[in-house]
Image (cartoon, rainbow, N blue to C red):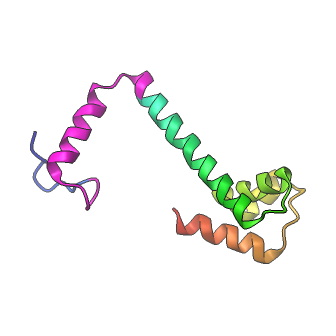
Amino acid sequence: MAALPGSRPLADDTPIDVEERQIEEWRRMSAAEKAALISGLTNATFVLAWAGLRRRYPGASDRELFLRMAVLPLGRDLAERAYPDIQMDNDAASSASAASVATS
């Protein structure tokens, strides 16, 4: 299977033949297999983010880590509306928001 004319590869650092094999494998997967793959990747992302927050704030309670984690995908404003008990200092909240933007 050749790339469509004018199409771009999914990743600049992957040879096109490898990318084509990966796409074929995705096409062969059932919907349940694809959902399980995405679920596993999502879970791994949250586990890594939680570990990073735990390392950055070793004395933080689980609730504080939860609230800091909420800021990452939601941003400070929405996280404060969703969780009014967020009481992080502005520097910490700004850092969490900046990290969210940097990884988007």
Which residue shows up at 53% across the image and 35% down it?
39
**Relative to 81, is 42 on the left or the right?**
left
State whether residue 82 is above or below residue 26. Answer: below
Percent x, y for residue 88?
A: 84, 67
Q: Main secondary structure of the magenta part?
A: helix
Label tally? 0
Judging depth in this view, the residue of 56 and 104 nearest the camera is: 56
Confirm whether the magenta stretch covers residue 72: no
State whether residue 32 is above or below residue 40. Answer: above
The residue lying furthest to the bottom in this view is 91
Percent x, y for residue 91?
A: 77, 77
Which residue shows up at 14% across the image and 56% down it?
6
**Relative to 78, is 52 on the left or the right?**
left
In the image, the segment drawn in magenta is 10-33
Occupied quadrant, residue 85 = bottom right
Percent x, y for residue 92?
A: 76, 72
Confirm whether the magenta stretch covers residue 27: yes
Percent x, y for residue 70?
A: 72, 54
Which residue shows up at 41% across the image and 25% down it?
33
